[in-house]
């Protein structure tokens, strides 16, 4: 799904929902999507990973994003087989929530 697909689906869902303004434009929804993802991304950029705490963002029914630190390690170059150093990195992990899992496994 692309950003444009998401915007169109949000507008279609808003048209079916009661209480949501029918005059929502693609530009308005696009700006809202940008703000939401910008805030989530900014949170993870600013948040610190500690030994006791990994920053997380949970959206009930969908899942949890968790910021994690991966330690540096030694790997192998697949072409030559030479050992290479892989530097430490910060990454995000995603764990789907119960609602999403049950929707994925419906028959």
Image (tube, rainbow, N blue to C red):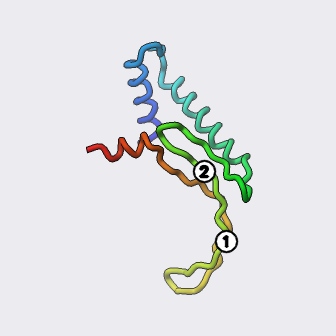
Residue pictured at 41% horizontal, 29% vertical: 8
Local crowd at mark 2 within 10 Å, few (<14), some, or many (≥20)? Answer: some
Position of 58 relative to 53 (above/below): above
| Quarter of the view holding residue 58 | top right
Place of residue 63 in the rendered image (x, y in percent of width and height, measured from the top left): 50, 44
How far apart are the two marked residues, 1 and 2, measured between alpha carbons?
19 Å
- State left or right for residue 38 relative to residue 33: right
Residue 66 circle label: 2
Q: Earlier in the sequence, mark 1 or mark 2?
A: 2
Residue pictured at 57% horizontal, 28% vertical: 32
Count numbered badges in the picture.
Answer: 2
Residue pictured at 43% horizontal, 24% vertical: 11
Say which of marks 1 and 2 sits in front.
2
Position of 16 relative to 58 (above/below): above
Tell me the residue that label 1 is attached to: 72
Residue pictured at 48% horizontal, 40% vertical: 62
Place of residue 23 in the rendered image (x, y in percent of width and height, measured from the top left): 47, 14
Position of 89 relative to 98 (above/below): below
Q: Can you say which quadrant of the picture contains the C terminus? A: top left
């Amino acid at each position: 799904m692309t950003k444009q697909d998401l915007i169109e689906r949000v507008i279609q869902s808003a048209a079916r929902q009661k209480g949501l303004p029918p005059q929502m434009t693609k530009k308005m929804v696009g700006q809202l999507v940008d703000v939401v993802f910008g805030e989530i991304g900014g949170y993870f950029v600013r948040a610190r990973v500690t030994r006791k705490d990994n920053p997380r963002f949970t959206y009930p029914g969908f899942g949890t994003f968790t910021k994690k630190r991966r330690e540096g390690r030694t790997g192998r170059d697949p072409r030559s087989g030479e050992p290479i150093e892989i530097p430490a990195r910060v990454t995000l992990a995603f764990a789907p929530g119960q609602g999403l899992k049950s929707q994925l496994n419906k028959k």
